[in-house]
Image (cartoon, rainbow, N blue to C red):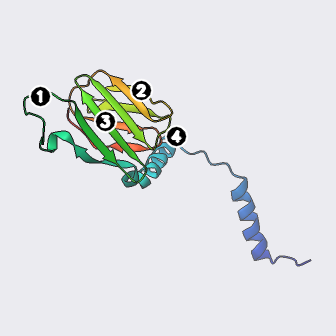
Amino acid sequence: MNESTPEEQAVLDDLALALREHHDIDPRHREAAQAAFAWRTIDDELMELTYDSLQTPAMVRSAGVDEPRTVSFTSSIGSLELEIDGDRVMGHVLPGATVTVVMTNVVGESLTSASDEDGVFELAGNLPGPVRFSISGQGVTQWLTF
């Protein structure tokens, strides 16, 4: 068996001591590190507005008819289809799955709904100001004004 030189033994002793020491991490530092880590995939998680019936000229319908607004968001993960009719939001998350959908406004008020196994959900009520939708495990939409 090879014996260590005094210099090598000193390094091994320092390494053993470092491995035995327990370093507590300040909870604020841990939280900041976890928050920074979460931002690494934010671009993949942000769903982009790809269709808004308010921005599409009416082809057949008359301008005076009050119809529900339809909105679509997409990302590399999936898509979110919404129909907004007064104070009711009907939605469909694709690919279909049981998820939690949260509609939040800029002051932090929110409405929450669980979808069925096909990704269909309904939110009853309306929030003032711009809102965004977050979908458990699928991402967050851009801000949308009703």
In the depicted view, which residue is nearer to us: 60 or 54? Answer: 60
> Could you tell me if the residues under marks 4 and 1 are in contact, i.e. CB atoms within 8 Å?
no
In the depicted view, which residue is nearer to us: 113 or 14? Answer: 113
Tag in front: 4 or 1? 1
Identify the secondary structure beneath mark 3.
Answer: strand
Amino acid at the residue labelled 2: Ser
The residue under label 4 is 27
Quadrant of the snapshot with the C terminus: top left
User: Which sits earlier in the primary sequence, circle 1 or circle 2?
Assistant: 1
> Could you tell me if the residues under marks 3 and 4 are in contact, i.e. CB atoms within 8 Å?
no
Mark 4 Cα-neighbour bin, 10 Å: few <14, some 14–19, many ≥20: few
Residue placed at 15% from the left, 44% from the top?
Answer: 55
The residue under label 2 is 113
Name the image quarter holding residue 128. Answer: top left
> Could you tell me if the residues under marks 2 and 4 are in contact, i.e. CB atoms within 8 Å?
no
The residue under label 3 is 82
The residue under label 1 is 65
Identify the secondary structure beneath mark 1.
Answer: loop
